Image (tube, helix red, strand yellow):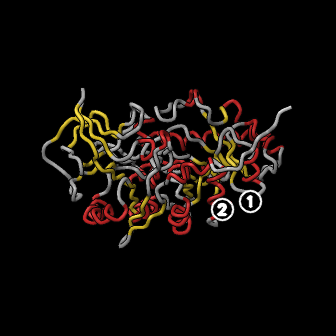
Amino acid sequence: MPMSEAFKQRLLPVLPEIIQHYGTPLRIFDEQGIRDEARNLKAIFQDPIFRFQEFYAVKAWPNHPVIARLMYQEQGFGFDCSSPSELISMRWHDVPSSHLMLTSNNTPDELFRLATTEGDCILNLDDITMIDRVPKFPELICFRYNPGKRRGGTDFIGNPVDSKYGVPHHDIVKAYRRAIGRGAERFGLHTMIISNELRCSYMVETVRMLLDVIEMVSAKLGIQFEFINIGGGVGIPYRPTERPFNLSGLAAEAGKLLYQFKEKHGYSPRLFIECGRLMTGPHAVLIAKVIQRAVKYHKFIGVDTCTLAANPRPAIYPTAYHHIDILDSDCRIKEGKRELVNVHGSLCENNDYFAWRRVLPLAEVGDYMMQHDNGAHAPAMCSNYNGWLRIPELLFGSNSVALIRRGETMDDLFATLNYEEDILKLN
């Protein structure tokens, strides 16, 4: 959602000093906002029926030292990993295996080895064919469930029936039966079939769906489930006119379903969730300097970075929207005269727009674009396309600003070209 008033009031008075020291472009994270978000999530799911656990989706913001400190060391949250580097980095920061979940797809053997033979993280398998490929099968196993036509999807993640993710409904009992054959004795069930969802009712139905599935599997195989994991998918209101996701409503309705399940079966599974976007998404802004005004068939405002190096979401997803404020050279929010413009970067591509056909205050060269909701996926999806360098990241604290990821340099960009020549001579 557009940055909180508290963040705005704390940041804008000192933003000129920050820009003078670090330059632009840069992304600034609000430490207090992230802390408050984590505490709020934990408080909302405090009912003992949940025995709640958040597994922060590392893919949302892979700044590993910072999220390890803010999420695990302070709140006891876990981490959902999907690649070798995410898993390794969390272990570097002493996150125990019980707080690590591997949710991957098309998983290479090396990743299975990292997950199971170098510390048993919670293994969340994406397909029934993976069961025989796990070298050291764990006692606790989870499967990602794909309901197919039973549920709908979104533009961001697609419809379940067309998705590469998850064990289809007709294979789910078989998957657990084969896992038992390999030694599994403890069980969880996961799903993630939607992304950036703002309807509380949809996520409530996801809880209901998973409880129905574990009831079916339990009846057929005589097993109990330790947890259900409703995945990520909880959205944030990128547009000022959108309403925030009703977390309290989700907790209330999910609690009712879990109590009903317990009354019927004598036990209830724990509730896990993998919020990434919700935890950090609203709590960062992108600051870029206006370096050009141009009038062609439309009005164009050029800034000193590009989407793929700073925030690829608007370029990748046609429906993605990020709210923008125009700041004057003293970092005051501009009001007054407005115009219909396109805000763009320097890519040699025609989708390089931070905003397309947006009515904004008049932006002059030397002003700044402040783009909201840059705390999740925006920093993680950046690339060096066209050779542009990824931007610095700052953590804005109560009385200091810390550089938590420096901007890339040309040396970084060319580092993989500096290798000893390796030539395979063929017969």
Secondary structure under tag 1 reads loop
From the viewer's perspective, tell me whether residue 345 is left or right of residue 170.
left
Query: Which of the numbered marks, if any, corresponds to residue 119?
Result: 1
Q: Where residue 70 sits: x, y (%)?
A: 50, 65
Q: Where residue 68 sits: x, y (%)?
A: 55, 63
N-term-proximal mark, 2 vs 1: 2
In front here: 137 or 410? 410
On the rendered image, what quadrant is the C terminus found in? Answer: top right
Residue name at image x 38 percent, y 52 percent = 282
Count of marks placed on residues: 2
Residue under circle 2? 91
Secondary structure under tag 2 reads helix
Q: Is residue 36 above or below residue 317?
A: below
Three-letter code, disc 1: Gly
Three-letter code, disc 2: Arg
Q: Are marks 2 and 1 in contact (CB under 8 Å)?
A: yes
Q: Is residue 331 visible?
A: yes
Q: Where residue 355 sits: x, y (%)?
A: 32, 38
| Mark nearer the viewer, 2 or 1 | 2
Q: Is residue 49 visible?
A: no
